[in-house]
Amino acid sequence: MGDIDKGGRRIELVLYTSPSGFLSAKAVRNMERVLAEYERTWVLFTICDVTRHPRDAEADSITFTPTLLRRYPGPRAWILGDLEDISVVTRMLRAAGIERASELPSIVSA
């Protein structure tokens, strides 16, 4: 199992985007598609527009959009591009102990 942060999450991901960027829009769609398959309780996912939050982008060393940043657990990791190859994201989620929603045991009520 992955470590758990103070907010009860196993992983924190930030997707830095540009409002006019085609690749940014594609990266958002790809992240939504991937995360829809996973247990979101353990995932803190934020989309950050660099034009609205330039200081956050600077603090996280963002120089290109779209960029996905894994803030937690460390070490930090940056993935550049539209995230079309979702296997990179799924490996990060798996490494943090996040299971696919379809793999979770079902609870049957009597």
Image (cartoon, rainbow, N blue to C red):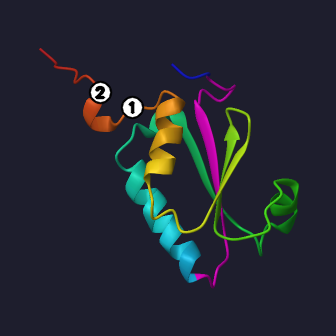
Residue 78 pos. (x, y %): 69, 52
Q: Quadrant of the C terminus?
A: top left
Residue type at the position of mark 2: Leu
Q: Does dot 1 land on a helix, a strand or a loop?
A: loop
Residue 83 pos. (x, y %): 51, 62
First to last magenta residue range: 4-21
Most common SS among magenta residues: loop
Residue type at the position of mark 1: Glu
Considering every residue shown, the one lying at the far top of the view is: 110
6 displayed left or right of 91: right
Residue 13 pos. (x, y %): 62, 47
Instruction: Tell me if mark 2 has few (under 14), some (14-19) or many (20+) residues whose alpha carbon lies within 10 angstroms of its own.
Output: few
Task: Return the mark for residue 110.
Answer: none
Give the labeled residue for mark 1: 99
In the image, 79 versus 3, the foreground residue is 79
Instruction: Tell me if mark 1 has few (under 14), some (14-19) or many (20+) residues whose alpha carbon lies within 10 angstroms of its own.
Output: some
Task: Return the mark for residue 104.
Answer: 2
Q: How many marks?
A: 2
Give me the C-alpha separation between circle 1 and circle 2. Answer: 7 Å
Q: Earlier in the sequence, mark 1 or mark 2?
A: 1
In the image, 107 versus 82, the foreground residue is 82
48 displayed left or right of 29: right
Q: Does dot 2 land on a helix, a strand or a loop?
A: loop
Residue 3 pos. (x, y %): 61, 21
Q: Do callouts 1 and 2 mark residues in contact (Cβ within 8 Å)?
A: yes
